[in-house]
Image: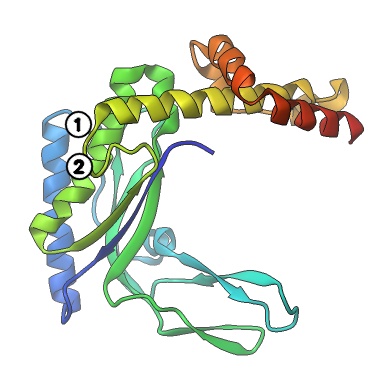
Amino acid sequence: MGLTVHFKLAAPPGTDAARARELIRALRRRAQGFKQRGRVEDVLPIGDDQESLCWATQYRPVPHPCKPGVHSGIEIPAVRGFLFSVAVGEDCEPLWLGLCCYPMTVILAGRRYRTHLAPWSFQGFTKTQYASLHGWEHFRRCHTAVVDLLAGTRRLGLAVEINDEGDYWPGRSLAALRKNLDQMNRLVAATAGALKDGDSPEAGERALESPIFGHRQFERLEAEGAAQVSPVLEKLRTALREV
């Protein structure tokens, strides 16, 4: 739970491996420009080995062949690709960027499924929510850097789709972003507070942990969030007491 930027990247039709590598090199140079301007903290080297490619694994829900009405997640590993990671800022998830090739089909329980993934493409997401533990300005820098870096891939000839849960994109509205951040922080704080209240004394090390507890204004956020969703939270507390 938390504000997240989801995205899809795709190279132009006819792109081969050499061109895909050049596109990612150009994208990394753009990310390095963000670092030089203080918009992100670090840009890691491009990787094309199996350790790097594990970050490109995609997942698709497919009908389970043996259980009617049930869907199962199936892994779609990249067979080749070029990726790098951007360290955006403290308590913001890293932004992985790249272009990869995927198999046309995958097999689950003896049945073959089409992956429907474009050649030399990439899908990913970055949760920016908890950058707000360090204040609005830090969060704003992190969130807008992620979106602006993704949006700029169009200048390189890449097709990009951005789904911004903070509503900063596509209008680049800081007012909308701050409103959504405040709402989500209140919701997360209220929910986490209710779950923690439901922990038994015997929970010990298993007690609920959440980054939101480290927010400098957690108690205010929890109270405001609880006031907004009190009926739902009361049902949650009741259910926890009955467990």
Judge by depth and name the residue closer to the eye, 197 or 203: 197
Task: Name the residue at 37% across, 36% down.
Answer: 166
Percent across and percent down for residue 220 are 55, 10
Q: Amino acid at mark 2?
A: Asp
Q: Quick check: 226 above or below 8?
A: above
- For the residues labelled 2 and 1, the Cα–Cα distance comes to 10 Å
Percent across and percent down for residue 112 are 55, 88
Q: Is residue 238 left or right of residue 4?
A: right
Q: Quick check: 75 above or below 193?
A: below
Judge by depth and name the residue closer to the eye, 111 or 20: 111
The residue under label 1 is: 39
Secondary structure at numbered mark 1 = loop
Q: Is residue 161 left or right of residue 226?
A: left
The residue under label 2 is: 148
Q: Is residue 9 visible?
A: yes
Q: Of the residues tagged 2 and 1, which is closer to the observer?
A: 2
Percent across and percent down for residue 165 are 39, 42
Q: Earlier in the sequence, mark 2 or mark 1?
A: 1
